[in-house]
Image (cartoon, rainbow, N blue to C red):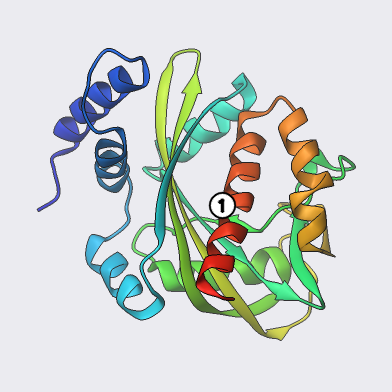
Amino acid sequence: MPLPRLDALNIWREHVKVCRGTQPFSLHQNAFLVASQLNDIDPAELESIINEYGAPRRLHFKANFVEFECELVRRSASKNRYHDITCFIPYDGGYVGIQKPGYAGSGIFRAPSGGANLGESLRKAAVREMHEETGLDIQLIRFVLDLTLDVVCSDGVIPWRSLVFLVEATGGEMKPIDTHEIFDIRVVTREEMLGEITRFMEESGWGGFKYRAFLTKSFFERIDELGF
């Protein structure tokens, strides 16, 4: 049974104490509990996805976000969304990478991501978001990572969760539909993603990019272990 929102928030406050080293209980257990209660991810649907696409590796990350990044997360939180669905799409010898207007010309391209709308299933959200951001039709192949993130802002910590999938392109053309959201798109190799792009992300000073660098490295480590 889902926890009442107030109870979940109280658990989150205790979780923040863990991050500060003042309480000796399980960081991962509480992080995943809170993230699962503070967004609109249906536990029953998530269990169904795990049964169909495999159990993901669970990891946790903490990053200091600059103010404009925090404001973006707050806007999402104001709509009761504390999650994203990230998809790695193998394509033409590499992976589809997107670049948004906020970091246009930076050399950073990352795996596309988006969130489920209220009442929308995770499967449908993944297909819709990937089509809007890349122009491609996709099919889920493997549930790779279930990540929780502490978004550390000047006024507190916001919980976030990323569901990360390996997917297959089944049709369409690699050309963004939502050109307001996506500035550029291209195929990037694994070596680029783990090399120069990761370096750009880690040197950016943005907490979101440090998280994306961690997510990307963790994704490739896991699919190597799975034999993909």
Q: Is residue 101 above or below residue 221?
A: above
Residue at the image position 34 percent from the left and 63 percent from the top: 119
Q: Can I make out residue 28 in this image? A: yes
Residue at the image position 60 percent from the left and 79 percent from the top: 138
Q: Is residue 153 above or below residue 111?
A: above
Q: Is residue 198 above or below residue 24?
A: below
Residue at the image position 62 percent from the left and 21 percent from the top: 66
Instruction: Judge from the rendering whether residue 128 lies leftward or rightward of residue 108; answer left or right.
Output: left
Q: Nearer the viewer, residue 86 or 41?
A: 86
Q: Is residue 25 above or below residue 111?
A: above
Position of residue 78 measured from the top left corner of the image (x, y, whole percent): 41, 35
SS for tag 1?
A: helix
Position of residue 14 measured from the top left corner of the image (x, y, whole percent): 23, 22
Q: Nearer the viewer, residue 77 or 20?
A: 20
Q: Which quadrant of the figure has residue 29?
A: top left
Q: Which residue is mark 1?
A: 218
Q: Residue furthest bottom?
A: 170
Please identify the quadrant where the C terminus is shown: bottom right
Position of residue 135 measured from the top left corner of the image (x, y, whole percent): 72, 73
Residue at the image position 58 percent from the left and 39 percent from the top: 211
Q: Residue furthest left?
A: 1
